[in-house]
Amino acid sequence: ALPVIQDNHAGLDEGDSTGVLVAKRVKKVRLNADNQNLVKVVKKMSKLTGKNFIVENSVRNERLTIISSSPVTVDEAYEGFVNALHAQKLKVVQMGKFYKICRDRGFLRVERETRDSALSSDAITKVNDSTWRISRSDLDLVLAEPSLLAVQARIVPNFVDGKPQGFKLFSIRPGSLYQLLGFKNGDVVKSINGMEINSPQKAMEVYNKLKTANKIVVNLSRRGEEKTFTYNIK
């Protein structure tokens, strides 16, 4: 069911057909949707948050997957919902007292503009399962065009116990830079060259430092397993 509202006190009401269990003192929710129809998820989010939504007809058949193993606040649940929309190239636009869910046409525009962008054949060489060699000239090209990175995967904040802890990768495109560098959907990038990535500002700081780095060391979590990837810049 999506979502289940929990309380620290005994005695949850039976709820209704939407799958929302209501407690006298609501504190946390567990947000789960396994490939559910967008409209169904939106109805439940509307009931949970009190927000009014408009769903564009062209996206009403989209499906969302949100998995929450631990309870989160209502605000965190809404943030997860918005991030799930982003993973499907959708966005939320506030229109007065309503929130419109529609295609992220800006994303699609950039995708069209960069669809034919390609790295040279020898830009990235895999040395072993955790080490790669990257051409300096190709890395400079990529870093100079952040829009190329923006359309090759969805990067959203990762939260643990309500606190930011790295960024999670979704919707990695086949043949993209992320795939060539060994990343997989669901990977959580925690730090780069020893610098923790726990905010957009920190991520931008790391991004700028990569322009002069001779080596990039990425610490990430994949399905609970910690991994370290090393990229030597030549």
Image (cartoon, grey):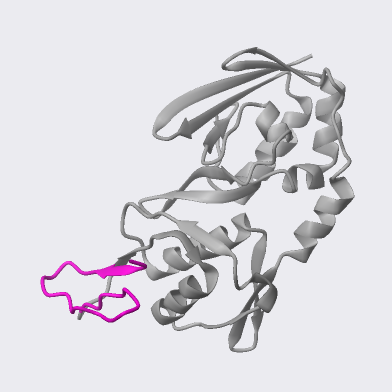
Q: Measured along the vertical axis of the image, is residue 142 above or below residue 212?
A: below
**Which residue is at 33% across, 51% downward?**
69
Q: Residue 4 or 142: which is nearer the viewer?
A: 4
Is 62 displayed left or right of 146 in the figure?
A: left
In the image, farthest residue toward the front = 61
Can you tell which quarter of the image residue 225 is in?
A: top left
Q: Measured along the vertical axis of the image, is residue 105 above or below residue 48?
A: above
**Which residue is at 57% across, 51% downward?**
156
Can you tell which quarter of the image residue 5 is in?
A: bottom left
Question: What segment carries the magenta color?
Answer: 1-23
Q: Is residue 2 shown in magenta?
A: yes
In the image, farthest residue toward the top = 127
Q: Residue 104 or 205: which is nearer the viewer?
A: 104
**Which residue is at 62% across, 59% downward?**
86
In the image, farthest residue toward the left = 10
Q: Measured along the vertical axis of the image, is residue 144 above or below residue 25?
A: above
Q: Measured along the vertical axis of the image, is residue 104 above or below residue 130?
A: below
